[in-house]
Image: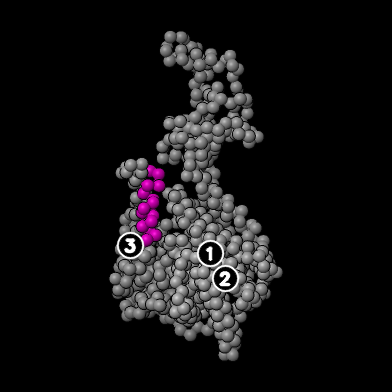
């Protein structure tokens, strides 16, 4: 679950650090001074419990318990997890100092989200519904954490895509085990000492339910973005057919990849595969914009737009073909104007592609956006912290 | 638990000001993470080794810790070389090992171990208590430091409590297996641990109130910046800056 030092890219580390500062600020703000010993002892208890090996199928796994931590502590789970990870980094060298921010985010955000979802339910219900929520928060927190770990790796470089997928898959059995354990622990707590769960739940300005509703879609956007990447699709219209060629950023051809052609209304008009040269051709039925989607497996995906404007009539098409053929043979003479027309037709798609490339260079990459969001979050956290200090004085 | 094993010792680093050590460890990690050239990374690793030598830590124990951490790095070595796109070096059946993948795995291993060595030498040579004090002196919010302090203070208490409960179930013939009975037993064990720690938290708070606790974290030990700290700071920063300098001279990444 912990990402070691030296793996992640700097923007990801900064964004994680900034997010953690914000989470810590909120968590500490919500924690009363008289709660400190209680929270500290729970932190210690979680740290101890997370060292337990629980058998999962043929092997065993460490408990994470961030779902339950979220249920018991809410936003205060942020400082609790931060401290636990700091101990691990300093004492056992698990994780690390530079990755402390990212690792805290990866575990604490799911804890807070699951806590916010489950706490209101557990407050009023102790029956089946409560147990279902406990299972969801226990398993969901692990799944979300695994997705965030995978996402932070994938955002750090395309090379980590395979590793991040492996990590995600490896966490699925752990998620199931944690779901079962969560139900058992929550039902035990409800029977033995219900005031632990049915205690005073603060409903401050950040409304315990509001934040997750905002955060979850952003997370999903990040994950889907991280997986959709780096295969290039070059498509053009040559007067008769839409031709497309797919290749990876390293230059290898995207062989036997699925090709989807959608018309301007998003309706699928063609579904096929690229040949052994990574090429594909398709005869468009009518004028209009076509969206071509290439799926090269392993999450590699590219899409591009091709507009079919000056569609030649059936009669004109063979003529053009004839002219080119003749030009090759050198038997028929073609006028300069005709030659230029042919050249234009051949070169236009390349021109378009160059323009598009130039445009892409100017566009801000997704990584920059994430880092920017992180900076904003960090500055907000700083502002909250300063405001709180001022109030105290 | 022998977590603070490295904190006992009498080297320069053990006597150094913890505030200085925290700042240096942070700086070392940040600089090392940003290194792109192989020379810089190797130098960072050597610097880490040098610090560990200066701290006179048991090398056997250091390498034992490094081994555990490097299991994660090993996983990257097994996966990255053939999943990274790039120029192929070796072809093993359908798998192509790329030089980019090998370079990436190498750079991660160097950086990771460099930072861990530096952290071992700088942070693990202080007790958690003096680190907490140093954090308070470095203007970390008081609530955070108190949480940190209490968590560590009661970690051992709760750990021995948990150990006792585990022994109790073992005495009654419990053997962990992959079944519902095991899960239920563990769940009750953990639930009991939570309740026990919450109740202890309550009584700790009451005991503190009796002794006049008002939320202030009183700093009892004050650190002084000594001449030998200046040497440590000077040496480490000079080393880091020379690595950065070498990095600048090698613009090709």
Numbered disc 3: secondary structure: helix
Q: How many marks?
A: 3
Residue A105 visible somewhere in the drawing: no
In the rendered image, residues at marks 3 and 2 fall on the same chain: no
Residue located at (57% from left, 60% from top) = A140
Q: What stretch is highlighted in magenta?
A: B71-88
User: Mark 2: few, some, or many residues within 10 Å (few <14, many ≥20)?
Assistant: many
Instruction: Please tell me which residue is depicted at 49% across the width and 55% down the height of the picture.
Output: A168
Q: Determine if the magenta segment contains residue B73.
A: yes
B158 left or right of B118 in image:
right
Counting from the top left corner in percent of width and height, residue A201 is at 67, 72
Q: Is residue A1 magenta?
A: no
Viewer-side residue, B179 vs A47: B179
Q: Which of marks 3 and 2 is in front?
A: 2
Marks 3 and 1, Cα distance to the nearest angstrom?
A: 38 Å
**Label 2, on which residue?**
A185
Vertical position of residue A366 compared to residue A251: above or below: below
* Residue at 53% over, 15% down: A318
Is A167 on the left-hand or right-hand side of A389?
A: left
Residue B53 in the image, given as x and y percentages of width and height:
29, 71
Residue at 63 percent of width and 73 percent of height: A190
The numbered disc on residue A178 is 1
Q: Are marks 3 and 1 in contact (CB under 8 Å)?
A: no
Q: Name the residue under label 3.
A: B45
Q: Which of B238 and A247 is in front in this view?
A: A247
User: Compared with residue A285, is residue A372 higher up or lower down, i.e. above or below?
Assistant: below
Query: On screen, A37 above or below A168?
Result: below
Which colouring convention does the figure follow?
one colour
Q: Quadrant of residue A130?
A: bottom right
Q: In which quarter of the image is the C terminus of chain A?
A: bottom right
Q: Nearer the viewer, mark 3 or mark 1?
A: 1
């Amino acid at each position: 679950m912990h990402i070691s030092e030296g793996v992640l890219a700097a923007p990801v580390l900064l964004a994680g650090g900034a997010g953690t500062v914000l989470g810590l600020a909120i968590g500490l703000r919500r924690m009363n001074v008289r709660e400190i010993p209680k929270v500290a002892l729970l932190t210690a208890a979680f740290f101890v419990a997370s060292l337990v090996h629980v058998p999962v199928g043929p092997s065993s796994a460490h408990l994470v318990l961030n779902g339950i931590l979220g249920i018991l502590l809410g936003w205060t789970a942020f400082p609790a997890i931060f401290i636990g990870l700091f101990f691990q980094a300093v004492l056992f060298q698990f994780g690390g100092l530079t990755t402390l921010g990212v690792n805290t985010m990866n575990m604490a955000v799911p804890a807070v989200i699951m806590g916010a979802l489950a706490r209101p339910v557990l407050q009023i219900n102790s029956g089946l519904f409560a147990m279902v929520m406990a299972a969801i928060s226990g398993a969901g927190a692990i799944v979300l954490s695994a997705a965030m770990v995978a996402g932070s790796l994938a955002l750090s470089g395309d090379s980590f895509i395979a590793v991040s997928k492996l990590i995600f898959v490896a966490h699925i059995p752990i998620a199931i085990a944690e779901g079962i354990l969560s139900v058992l622990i929550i039902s035990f707590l409800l029977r033995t000492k219900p005031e632990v769960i049915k205690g005073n739940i603060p409903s401050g300005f950040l409304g315990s339910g509001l934040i997750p509703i905002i955060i979850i879609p952003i997370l999903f956007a990040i994950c889907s973005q991280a997986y959709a990447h780096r295969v290039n699709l070059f498509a053009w219209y040559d007067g008769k057919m839409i031709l497309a060629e797919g290749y990876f950023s390293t230059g290898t051809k995207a062989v036997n990849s699925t090709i989807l052609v959608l018309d301007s209304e998003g309706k699928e008009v063609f579904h096929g595969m690229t040949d052994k040269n990574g090429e594909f051709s398709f005869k468009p039925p009518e004028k209009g914009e076509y969206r071509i989607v290439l799926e090269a497996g392993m999450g590699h995906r590219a899409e591009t737009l091709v507009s079919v404007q000056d569609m030649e009539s059936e009669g004109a098409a063979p003529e053009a073909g004839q002219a080119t053929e003749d030009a090759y043979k050198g038997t028929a003479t073609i006028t300069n104007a005709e030659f230029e027309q042919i050249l234009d037709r051949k070169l236009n798609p390349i021109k378009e592609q160059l323009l598009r490339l130039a445009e892409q260079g100017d566009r801000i990459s997704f990584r920059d956006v994430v880092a920017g969001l992180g900076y904003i979050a960090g500055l907000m956290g700083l502002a909250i912290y300063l405001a709180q200090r001022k109030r105290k004085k | 638990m022998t977590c603070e094993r490295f904190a006992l010792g009498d080297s320069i680093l053990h006597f150094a000001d913890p505030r200085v050590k925290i700042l240096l460890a942070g700086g070392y990690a940040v600089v090392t993470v940003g290194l792109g050239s192989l020379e810089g990374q190797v130098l960072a690793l050597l610097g880490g080794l040098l610090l560990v030598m200066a701290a006179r830590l048991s090398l056997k124990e250091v390498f034992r810790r490094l081994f555990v951490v490097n299991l994660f790095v090993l996983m990257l070595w097994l996966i990255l070389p053939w999943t990274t796109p790039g120029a192929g070096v070796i072809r093993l059946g359908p798998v192509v090992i790329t030089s980019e993948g090998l370079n990436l795995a190498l750079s991660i291993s160097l950086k990771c171990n460099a930072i861990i060595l530096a952290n071992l030498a700088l942070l693990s040579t202080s007790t958690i208590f003096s680190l907490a004090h140093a954090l308070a002196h470095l203007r970390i919010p008081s609530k955070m430091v108190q949480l940190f302090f209490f968590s560590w203070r009661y970690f051992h208490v709760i750990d021995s409590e948990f150990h006792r409960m585990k022994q109790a179930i073992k005495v009654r013939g419990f053997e962990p297996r992959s079944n519902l009975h095991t899960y239920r037993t563990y769940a009750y064990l953990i639930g009991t641990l939570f309740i026990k720690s919450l109740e202890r938290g309550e009584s700790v708070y009451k005991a503190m109130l009796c002794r006049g606790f008002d939320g202030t974290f009183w700093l009892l030990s004050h650190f002084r910046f000594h001449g030998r700290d200046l040497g440590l700071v000077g040496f480490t920063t000079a080393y880091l800056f020379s690595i950065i300098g070498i990095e600048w001279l090698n613009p090709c990444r």
